[in-house]
Image (cartoon, rainbow, N blue to C red):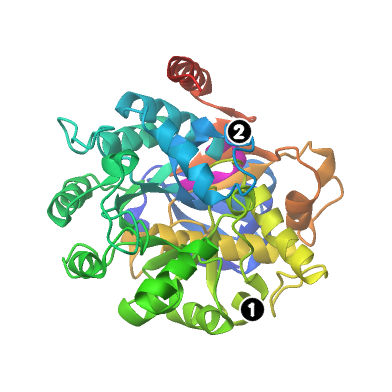
């Protein structure tokens, strides 16, 4: 059965691949053939003899989008696991993060991000949404090139080969009361004018693997009028818009005290929240907020390993899924870099909360693994604002938006996958053991990981080690 095929006039040099099972928009397709040209899927078919196509393996999946990343935080993973206060929380962790962030310059950021992005690719992420607020020098003065830190991230993504949605972040105040940024926050700050100039500059660099959106750090860091000015600027009409929201109870309490509404409630009442938006965390919501967020079409950006590490709380996944809400996953602070672990703990958190099993299922599938993978692909691609996350041929009516050719090949030799087929392969992939089963990774038609090794991992890792040795802990 043919899913879709692009017009023959678009076809350049084409590579054809086959797989015993490929994860297509409707689920597993057997005896699949994938034709790739110019970095995109031209056609994807199932129930097709392999003929001369290169056989990839038994199980091929779309690459997973990572919808929330602070790349520099990968280098401090494990450094905040000592008690500093009996009431340790996100707010005490944040002080450790600020101290570490204050030592990082553009070259450091590039080295750290490139290493992280290699790790992401090897784990199965093929695109990352970088929520970037480390803009200036530690004292708040801009670098000679005000975009230096953003350009470091772009270059790191190019080196590693991962797709990137760069989200320069507006950060203006230190709290809901409008207080000035603290000394440690100064390098995050922008005026509306300098922020929009940065967006305009970076937009000129967009290509098939780079998209530029915007991020509003949080309601506490972006005053209402500033939010309106950015949203009315004309630069965000079709761009992804991301925001941290309702991550901690303290944030909810402050918003209630000073804005007389809960954070998600306030945002839905005061902003045109729609499918362009990604609300990161949204951990603490009422049932009404949960329903309204689902109905808005926005994506809930869930980061279970970071949310667990920081003690944030548990998202109301069951109610949100019943309301047909879209969600995706991100590794956020990168205490873990694994889509398997994010999805596994997304489900396990719900099991601990409800004391039942097999929570994340849908009307069309009783497979937890299949449901979670499909939902995270859809929500992640929507949050990234680009055509990724599917094995599907280009639309003849709109060939310029053919899905980028990102895919993962699972390890045929893995004992865990022995005797598995399309009925249980994803459940096994997500819930059986901790060995990495992602053998090969392609982004934009280019093989970046082969036999578990990234093409440039040794050089990138050596530079990362040199950088962290110099920075110290």
Image-based side of 352 in relation to 49, left or right? right
Q: Secondary structure at mark 1?
A: helix
Which part of the image, by quadrant, shows the N terminus?
Answer: bottom right
Indicate which disc, 2 or 1, sits on the residue closer to the N terminus. Answer: 2
Determine the residue positioned at 70% across, 69% down.
360
Across and down, in percent, residue 169 comes to 31, 52
Front residue of 43/469: it is 469
Which residue ends up furthest to the front in the rendered image?
86
Q: Secondary structure at mark 2?
A: loop
Task: Please identify the quarter of the rendering in which residue 3 is found.
Answer: bottom right
Decide if residue 437 is in sight here: yes
Determine the residue positioned at 16% across, 33% down.
145
Task: Please identify the quarter of the rendering in which residue 372 is found.
Answer: bottom right
Q: Is residue 426 part of the magenta span, yes or no?
A: no
- Give the crowd class for mark 2: few <14, some 14-19, many >=20 residues within 10 Å: few
Q: Which residues are magenta?
A: 121-127
Front tag of 2 and 1:
2
Front residue of 194/343: it is 194
- Real-space CA distance between mark 2 and mark 1, rounded to the nearest whole angstrom: 33 Å
Disc 2: which residue: 78
The reply to whether callout 2 and callout 1 are in contact (CB within 8 Å) is: no
Across and down, in percent, residue 193 comes to 12, 54
- Which of the numbered marks, if any, corresponds to residue 35? none
Task: Please identify the quarter of the rendering in which residue 382 is found.
Answer: bottom left
Vertical placement of residue 220 versus 191, above or below: below
- Give the crowd class for mark 1: few <14, some 14-19, many >=20 residues within 10 Å: some
- Which of the numbered marks, if any, corresponds to residue 319? 1
Tell how many labels: 2
Image-based side of 428 in relation to 222, left or right? right
Front residue of 165/316: it is 316
Q: Is residue 126 part of the magenta span, yes or no?
A: yes
């Amino acid at each position: 059965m043919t899913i879709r095929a692009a017009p023959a006039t678009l076809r350049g040099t084409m590579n054809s691949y086959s797989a015993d099972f490929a994860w297509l928009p409707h689920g597993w397709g057997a005896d699949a053939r994938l034709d790739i040209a110019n970095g995109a899927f031209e056609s994807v078919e199932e129930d097709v003899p392999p003929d001369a196509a290169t056989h990839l393996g038994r199980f091929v999946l779309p690459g997973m989008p990572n919808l929330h990343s602070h790349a520099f935080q990968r280098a401090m993973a494990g450094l905040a696991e000592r008690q500093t206060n009996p009431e340790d929380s996100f707010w005490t962790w944040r002080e450790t993060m600020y101290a570490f962030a204050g030592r990082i310059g553009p070259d450091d950021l590039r080295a750290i991000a490139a290493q992280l992005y290699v790790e992401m690719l090897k784990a199965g992420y093929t695109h990352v949404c970088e929520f970037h607020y480390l803009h200036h020098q530690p004292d708040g003065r801009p670098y000679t090139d005000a975009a230096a830190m953003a350009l470091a991230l772009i270059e790191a993504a190019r080196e590693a080969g991962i797709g990137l949605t760069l989200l320069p972040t507006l950060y203006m105040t230190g709290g809901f009361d409008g207080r000035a940024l603290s000394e440690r926050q100064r390098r995050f700050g922008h005026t509306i004018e300098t922020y929009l100039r940065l967006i305009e500059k970076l937009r000129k660099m967009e290509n098939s693997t780079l998209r530029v959106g915007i991020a509003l750090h949080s309601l506490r860091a972006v005053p209402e009028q500033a939010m309106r000015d950015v949203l009315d600027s004309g630069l965000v009409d079709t761009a992804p818009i991301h925001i941290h929201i309702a991550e901690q109870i303290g944030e909810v309490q402050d918003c209630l005290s000073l804005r007389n509404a809960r954070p998600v409630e306030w945002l839905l009442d005061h902003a045109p929240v729609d499918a362009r938006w990604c609300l990161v965390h949204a951990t603490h919501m009422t049932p009404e907020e949960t329903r309204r967020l689902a109905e808005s079409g926005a994506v809930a950006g869930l980061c279970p390993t970071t949310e667990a590490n920081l003690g944030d709380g548990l998202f109301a996944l069951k109610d949100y899924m019943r309301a047909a809400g879209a969600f995706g996953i991100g590794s956020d602070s990168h205490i873990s870099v694994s889509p398997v672990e994010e999805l596994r703990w997304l489900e396990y958190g719900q099991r601990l909360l409800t004391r039942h099993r097999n929570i994340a299922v849908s009307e069309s599938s009783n497979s937890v693994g299949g449901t979670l993978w499909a939902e995270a692909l859809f929500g992640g691609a929507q949050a990234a604002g680009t055509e990724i996350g599917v094995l599907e041929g280009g639309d003849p009516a709109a060939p310029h938006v053919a899905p980028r050719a990102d895919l993962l090949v699972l390890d045929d030799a893995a004992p865990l996958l022995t005797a598995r087929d399309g009925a249980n392969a994803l459940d096994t992939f997500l819930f059986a053991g901790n060995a990495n089963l992602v053998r090969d990774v392609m982004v934009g038609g280019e093989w970046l990981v082969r036999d578990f090794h990234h093409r440039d991992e040794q050089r990138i890792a050596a530079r990362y080690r040199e950088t962290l040795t110099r920075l110290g802990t």
